[in-house]
Structures are given as structure tokens and as C-alpha cells.
Image (cartoon, rainbow, N blue to C red):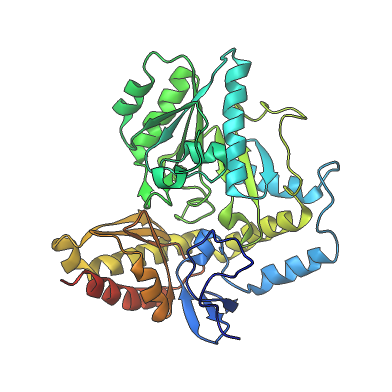
Amino acid sequence: MNAPAAASPHVMNTYARLPIAMSHGQGCRVWDVNGKPYLDALGGIAVNTLGHNHADLVAALQEQLTKLIHTSNYYHVTLQETLAAKLVELSGLTNVFFCSTGLEANEAALKLARKFGHDKGIERPEVVVYEKAFHGRSIATLSATGNPKVQAGFGPLVEGFVRVPANNIEALKKATQGNPNVVAVFFEAIQGEGGVNPMHLDYLRDVRALCDERDWLLMIDEVQCGMGRTGKWFAHQWAGILPDVMPLAKGLGSGVPIGAVVAGPKAAHIFAPGNHGTTFGGNPLAMRAGVETIRIMERDGLLANAEKVGAHLKAGLEAALKSEVANGGVKEIRGQGLMLGIELSKPCSALTQQCADHGLLISVTADNVVRLVPSLILTTAEADEIIAILCPLIQKFLAP
């Protein structure tokens, strides 16, 4: 079977796909339907935490399939309690709502913020969001997103958002000064689609203090940067703070669709029965995937691996691209752990196909940022392989 060269006539044309179709994977490698191998530095966009075809995860999911896939939330789901207790332990928060995607988790967070405001007597609650943010593609999360290209054609957008630049506490104070309707601040600890832009640790602490001072919810989107990707369970933990609301998804199920909203005391009891829900959220199969993902991560020391291999990969990229950094072709190499971005001086979407031609899967986000979010099982040898393939292609791309 040959890989498709163009979009299927029957599948809606919503993705600018490469002309590649994958057949199977093992560890950090995948093979297309023609048998060509690729080193996967994209990890399903920060989803395949344990890589592909992880023996223990596969066995657990196969066992679960013989028991229950879905029952509905009319009944207690024992594995929800198991996974919720683990997420509470890891986060220091108190309660969890399960859904199926990051978009749903972020939508639930926005509903929590609005009801928090209404419960305080605020008729038109407003949420602070950020330039370059990305929270999803529903109408509400699209409105919270800071990308005009993504929003184009879908107006009118949902009202109730105040937008500010990242890492500028004075700008946040100025934008909200005298506004009694603000109820929450909502941001990614490290922006993903916006170009792998980390929030500074001091800024995270300052925003936490401001939210405490003004009785706002601090809502930190950990959908892409959470679940061990930076070397801690959640990226905000590097700042030593606790959010009030934390959406999760992507890496939590190692490829099985799962989302969660983890909440602390200030937000955990805002929802009551009938306020929010989902058909598929918290189903036994997804819960088993989450439980097993965390169990394997803990057993195999994958947080430490993400920190160590990520630092090795970043240092290797900096060394290999030293000349390009010096001459301005590479503007910055940033990120933490196994969430890294290489910002170039010009749009570079062509690199996705060029890398694939050389057996490497990456993505380009925010037009000119090469994004690397491989599985957390990545080895230093595989990191060196990424450097050996990617850096010469960047150098050739930037050559005059």
C-alpha cells in the first residue's frame, strides 16, 4: 500500500498533511505503509508519553478491553477514583473532573471561572488570557486563544476575555486595574502552539500572589507541558506554586484520548450535578491508560529521563547551531526537558517535509519555530540522532 499523495476525497480537508501514512511503531520509531522508518521527535504532538507499542501499556489496555470500555457516568467508575487520587497526590490539589481532550478540559476551566464569578454576584465575569496562547478550537477556547489566524472566519468570538502579554506583571496589573469583573487568570505554563514560550518562574509566583490578593482563580493549562514533559509532573511546579485549576490531556493516556481538570480547594466544589458533564469522559479504558501511564512513568524514572535527555538534547542543539545563533539565523533555542523550540529568523514550515524525507518527524509551530516534543522514553543516543538529522537541515535551510 502506498501512502496517500493528497487528501482523501471522503475526509474533511482540515489538516495540511504530509503525504505519509503510518503503519506501526516501536519505542521512539514509527514506520510508514511503505516500510520507511522515522525517528519520532513529535510524539503525536506530546501525546505518546511511553512511545509506541509499549509492552506493559498494551497488555493493560488489552486486559481492560476484555472487562469494560464504557459504562457512562450514571454509575461510579472505580478507575476514575484510582486515577483521580493519583493526580491529587502528584499535584497537591484536591479534586478531578475527567473528559476526553485538552479542549474539553480548557472549556471546563472557563466554565468554572464563569460560575466562580456568578457565585460571587458578578454578572459578566472576565478571564485574563495571553498573547500567543492556544487553548483549543471550540468557540470559547478559540476566543481565549491568542492567534488571529486560528480565529479568522469564526466570529463573533465569545466575549469576556482580557488579553495581556506574557511575563509582564505590570501589564497584567494595568489591564485589570479597576475592573471588578475579572475572576481568573488563564495561561499555559509553557505555550505550545504559540512557539514554545515558557512563563518565567518569578512571573508565575507574581501571578499567584496577585490572584490571592484579588480573589481570582489561577488557572494553568498544562495540556501540552504537563505529565512529566519538563522533568516535573507539571511545569508550574518548577516555580513552587499551586494553581486553583489545572487542565490536563495529551500525555496523560499515552495515546488514548483523555482529559482532566484538576482543581484545588478554591475551585473544586464550584460545579454541582447538572452544571457540567460528558459522555465519554472518565470511561474505564481511558482511566486504565492514565493509571498505567503514571505507574510506568514512576517505575521507569521518566521524569528524570525527560530532564536529563532534554538537557542533553538542548545542549547538543546549541552546540551544533552555534554559528546560526551568532549570525541571527537561529533566534533562540528555548524550552525545558523534552519540550523544546528552535526559533528561526524566517518561516520554516518546509522543514517538516525535509525532516520527514530524512527520517525524522518534527513540527513547525508559530510559523518559524521547530518544535520537538518526543516521547519521554527518548535516549541520549536518539537525542544525538535528532541533532545529527535536524541541524544540517536547519543550516541548509538558512544558508543564503
- Number of marks in the image? 0
One can see residue 92 in this view: no
Query: Measuring 34% from the left and 41% from the top, which residue is drawn there?
Result: 200
* Residue at the farthest left position: 327
One can see residue 17 in this view: yes
- When asked about the image quadrant of residue 119, the answer is top right
Determine whether 367 is above or below 80 in the image: below
Query: Which quadrant is home to the C terminus?
Result: bottom left
Query: Measuring 37% from the left and 30% from the top, which residue is drawn there?
Result: 206
Front residue of this view, candidates 34 and 371? 34
Front residue of this view, candidates 283 and 265? 283
Query: Measuring 70% from the left and 49% from the top, which residue is drawn there?
Result: 83
Query: Measuring 59% from the left and 51% from the top, which residue is drawn there?
Result: 249
Determine whether 152 is above or below 218 in the image: below
Task: Estimate the x, y position of residue 217 in percent, counting from the top left.
Answer: 52, 27
Task: Estimate the x, y position of residue 106 in percent, counting from the top left.
Answer: 57, 40
Task: Estimate the x, y position of residue 285 in percent, counting from the top left.
Answer: 75, 58
- When asked about the image quadrant of residue 57, the answer is bottom right
Task: Estimate the x, y position of residue 300 in percent, counting from the top left.
Answer: 57, 66
* Residue at the farthest front position: 9
Determine whether 340 is above or below 155 in the image: below
Query: Which quadrant is home to the N terminus?
Result: bottom right
Front residue of this view, candidates 95 and 113? 113
